[in-house]
Image (cartoon, coloured by chain):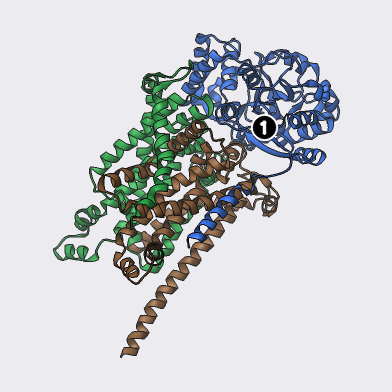
């Protein structure tokens, strides 16, 4: 009986570890949810023989906490601009050997050397976009060209804001005429109060679900990322997207290699692979977001190439700036945002 | 009249409990992804489910963790109960209080504290940490299920067995454990159920590579639940419902059999 | 037969996985590590008393209280009706009540949104009978509904299990002595059902107080409860000090509630009551 027990227990324990042993080379990738064409992963595995473990996160902060405190190890991660800056400052990333990433040359210059990684030593751009207002032309009678409309009582309980600290604070800060990267406590407080004022008008602070809701007609106005807008408009022709005249945020999600990476060479192969025209095309089609290389953009259909939501004019883009990271300011933003949501 | 009111009331309660489940099941058959508009009957999500490795992996993880954790917790807990019952009052009460902590503590506190523990010890978050966490919150339930049965056990059978020459362990296995079985089984089932449905504790104690079903639902909830999840839940639900109904039927018919046998015996005696 | 040894594996397990984590919470709640050195501090505890967090705590207490009361009002009659049914129907009914708990609770809760949306089933029904759209989602109503929905079975089952064990003779005796139905209920049935009621209240109030999933899924980010703040500290801001302090507070709140609730009952919130 004792013997049987021992065998049973050891069998059970062994079984539970069975899945953890593989002889193949492995690559651990950590990306946003629904931010890739999964066929791309299959293609990569086929071409290189490297097995890919693909996992997703919902916000930069989630990802950051998991990486810095949770003792998990990834080889390629896709943080956003300001998060990349933070990770560089906190010494969490490896410098990328660009010689192993020849396709980097294809990335358009407008996406290179941005403030968060001035010499592109740590990151390679993946997808980019802007933040703007998605609105239902049938439900909104006024002209939509300013952030002010999100405070218009006529649309009470039909307004969606982003459940994202920086994006929502950005809207308030720019509406007040301040920089979205301000480190001034008084300005941050003012923005916070503006958001608290807005709260009764807000139907919800959502992330990706906002797209479906707008398509269904649950709301009239929403703050969204450009890629979501492109997708939503495709599903509901009554919708339109605009970058407010006061300016907005322009973002880039990049590929980085954390210091804890276990397979750097596979990571570099993967990053290079992602910059291929055909791969970029697949990802663009699947996610609806904007790719970084003109040679790949040329492969898109006419309507998409000329879609101002996806590919704004240089003039529009000039009104937008990238998020930057500042440790002290982050604490202030955290506090402010908590006040808004907990109010 | 009273009976009718009572029936209506129970029906309303059941309707309330099942409303979202019905919606869920119905939309698993919806042609389109939309949760509000019905666009025709279709089995497409069920088909797609079987090629979605992420969901299938999560299902596998959920069931594997539940099974392994429940088995280990059952062993750990049963032997713990056997030992606890022999303790002196003070030790007993201390152990009992500590055992109750995972039961009474909000699961967010349990989850968060275990996450800090793993960081402190240096265990990388992943399958193992999740398993350890599940065993931790399941074992107290096993102890709680087994202890009362232990109090009701007839020790004399155990002693009699030993008098007849059995070794203590053999006697334990053959006389005490069978009496405890209902409690052990309850403990096991309770552990399994809790583990399968757990979200909060798993959320904090697993690494990105390993996800259980609840975690997939949670991350999907932020972008619009994919009907494939509806499909997998419907399948799980039907399976459990079938199991429970079968078990219930057998219990009912065995009770009928017992009373029938009693009748027969009585008739024979006449 | 020294069976005390049998419990050793568990005792070791218990110390590592139950006691140490608790100590870690206390540790993080009272220390500050930001300068690299570990320093004792009351900052985290003081932070809890800022108006913002007090508001959140108050809101959580209030909403869980309402949810518990609603569960009680809905659940007690259900348990009574159930307890009076004949055997065959009883077990089928019980299964029907327990069955939903086997469906993933996140999914069940989330599915309510389909019903509660402005274009959802309930509102479409309300519009069709002339009442018009009512805001049912992303507000207090939705969250309390979510709590009641999730915890109602936990109120019904304990009360049912105690009611069913009440000796019918006692009720008969009371009736024989001339008590009417109301008196029988008030003087006999209800007091005897107390242990179950206490179990039910405990198993409803506690999880409701500490939930973060229900508010996350059903409030559209607008309603923040204690659980949400704690979760944010461990997933977004990384402020383990504050998170631990709030966790400690939660544990204290629950501990106090339990003592309070138990003043009106006996030791049944233990092996017997829970199962």
Q: Quadrant of residue B255?
A: bottom left
**Of B53 and A167, the residue lying toward us:** B53
Chain C tint as drawn: green
Residue that appears at 46% across and 54% down: B15
Chain B tint as drawn: brown
Q: Quadrant of the N terminus of chain C?
A: bottom left
Left or right: where does residue B170 sit relative to residue A248? left
**Of B57 and C174, the residue lying toward us:** B57
Q: Which residue is mark 1?
A: A31
Residue that appears at 79% across and 40% down: A49
Left or right: where does residue B172 sit relative to residue A26? left
Residue that appears at 39% across and 20% down: C47
Q: Position of residue A79 (x, y in %)?
A: 66, 25
Q: Secondary structure at mark 1?
A: strand
Q: Quadrant of the C terminus of chain C?
A: bottom left
The answer for which chain carries disc 1 is: A
Q: Position of residue C71 (x, y in %)?
A: 37, 46
Chain A tint as drawn: blue
The mark tally for this picture is 1
Q: Position of residue A7 (x, y in %)?
A: 54, 57
């Amino acid at each position: 009986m004792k013997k049987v027990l021992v065998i049973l227990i050891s069998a059970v324990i062994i079984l539970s570890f069975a899945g953890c042993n593989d002889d193949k080379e492995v690559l651990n990738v950590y990306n946003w949810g629904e931010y890739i064409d999964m066929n791309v992963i299959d293609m990569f595995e086929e071409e290189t023989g490297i097995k890919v473990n693909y996992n997703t996160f919902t916000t930069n902060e989630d990802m950051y906490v998991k990486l810095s405190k949770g003792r998990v190890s990834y080889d390629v991660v896709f943080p956003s601009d300001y998060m990349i800056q933070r990770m560089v400052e906190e010494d969490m990333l490896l410098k990328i050997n660009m010689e192993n990433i020849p396709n980097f040359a294809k990335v358009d210059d407008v996406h290179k050397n941005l403030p968060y990684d001035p010499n592109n030593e740590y990151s390679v751009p993946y997808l980019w976009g802007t933040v703007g207002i998605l609105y239902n032309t049938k439900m909104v009678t006024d002209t939509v060209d300013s952030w002010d409309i999100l405070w218009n009582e006529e649309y009470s309980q039909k307004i969606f804001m982003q459940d994202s600290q920086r994006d929502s604070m950005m809207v308030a800060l720019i509406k007040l005429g301040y920089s979205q990267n301000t480190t001034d406590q008084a300005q941050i407080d003012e923005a916070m109060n503006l958001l608290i004022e807005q709260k009764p008008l807000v139907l919800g602070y959502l992330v990706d679900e906002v797209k479906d809701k707008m398509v269904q007609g649950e709301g009239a106005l929403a703050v969204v990322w450009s890629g979501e807008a492109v997708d939503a408009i495709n599903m509901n022709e009554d919708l339109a997207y605009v970058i407010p005249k006061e300016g907005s945020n322009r973002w880039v999600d990049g590929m980085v290699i954390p210091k804890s990476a276990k397979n750097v060479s596979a990571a570099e192969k993967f990053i290079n692979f992602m910059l291929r025209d055909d791969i970029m095309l697949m990802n663009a089609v699947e996610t609806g977001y904007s790719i970084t290389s003109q040679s790949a953009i040329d492969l898109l259909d006419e309507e998409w190439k000329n879609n101002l939501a996806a590919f704004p004019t240089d003039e529009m883009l000039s009104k937008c700036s990238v998020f930057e990271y500042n440790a002290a300011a982050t604490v202030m933003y955290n506090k402010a945002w908590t006040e808004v949501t907990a109010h | 009249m009273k009976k009718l009111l009572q029936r209506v009331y129970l029906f309303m309660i059941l309707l309330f409990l099942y409303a979202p489940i019905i919606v869920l099941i119905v939309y698993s058959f919806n042609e389109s992804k939309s949760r509000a508009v019905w666009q025709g009957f279709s089995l497409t999500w069920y088909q797609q489910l079987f090629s979605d490795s992420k969901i299938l992996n999560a299902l596998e993880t959920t069931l594997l963790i539940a099974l392994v954790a429940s088995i280990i917790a059952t062993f750990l807990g049963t032997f713990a109960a056997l030992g606890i019952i022999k303790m002196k009052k003070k030790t007993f009460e201390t152990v009992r209080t500590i055992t109750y902590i995972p039961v009474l503590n909000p699961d967010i506190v349990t989850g968060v504290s275990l996450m800090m523990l793993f960081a402190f010890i240096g265990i990388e978050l992943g399958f193992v940490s999740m398993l350890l966490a599940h065993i931790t919150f399941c074992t107290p339930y096993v102890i709680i299920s087994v202890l009362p049965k232990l109090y009701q056990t007839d020790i004399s059978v155990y002693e009699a067995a030993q008098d007849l020459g059995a070794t203590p362990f053999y006697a334990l296995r053959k006389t005490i454990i069978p009496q405890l079985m209902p409690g052990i089984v309850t403990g096991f089932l309770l552990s399994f159920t809790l583990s399968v449905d757990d979200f909060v504790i798993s959320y904090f104690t697993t690494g990105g590579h390993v996800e259980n079903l609840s975690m997939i639902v949670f991350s999907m909830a932020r972008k619009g639940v994919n009907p494939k999840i509806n499909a997998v839940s419907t399948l799980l639900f039907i399976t459990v419902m079938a199991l429970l109904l079968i078990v219930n039927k057998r219990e009912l018919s065995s009770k009928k059999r017992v009373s029938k046998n009693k009748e027969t015996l009585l008739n024979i005696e006449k | 037969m020294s069976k005390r040894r049998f419990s050793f594996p568990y005792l070791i397990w218990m110390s590592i996985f139950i006691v140490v984590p608790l100590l870690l919470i206390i540790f993080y709640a009272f220390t500050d590590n930001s300068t690299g050195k570990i320093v004792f501090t009351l900052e985290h505890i003081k932070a809890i008393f800022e108006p913002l967090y007090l508001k959140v705590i108050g809101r959580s207490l209030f909403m869980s209280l309402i949810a518990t009361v609603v569960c009680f009002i809905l659940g007690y009659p259900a348990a009574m009706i159930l307890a009076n049914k004949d055997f065959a129907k009883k077990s089928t009914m019980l299964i029907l009540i327990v069955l939903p708990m086997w469906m993933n609770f996140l999914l069940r809760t989330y599915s309510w949104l389909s019903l509660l949306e402005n274009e959802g089933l309930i509102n479409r029904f309300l519009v069709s009978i002339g009442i018009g759209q009512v805001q049912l989602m992303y507000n207090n109503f939705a969250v309390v509904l979510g709590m009641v929905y999730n915890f109602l079975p936990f109120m019904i089952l304990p009360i049912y299990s105690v009611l069913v064990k009440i000796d019918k003779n006692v009720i008969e005796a009371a009736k024989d002595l001339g008590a009417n139905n109301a008196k029988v209920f008030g003087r006999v049935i209800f007091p005897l059902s107390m242990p179950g009621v206490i179990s039910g209240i405990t198993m409803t109030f506690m999880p409701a107080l500490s939930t973060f999933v229900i508010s996350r899924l059903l409030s559209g980010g607008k309603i923040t409860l204690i659980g949400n703040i704690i979760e944010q500290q461990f997933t977004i801001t990384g402020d383990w000090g504050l998170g631990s302090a709030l966790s400690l507070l939660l544990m204290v709140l629950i501990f106090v509630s339990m003592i309070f609730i138990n003043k009106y009952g006996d030791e049944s919130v233990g092996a017997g009551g829970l199962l």
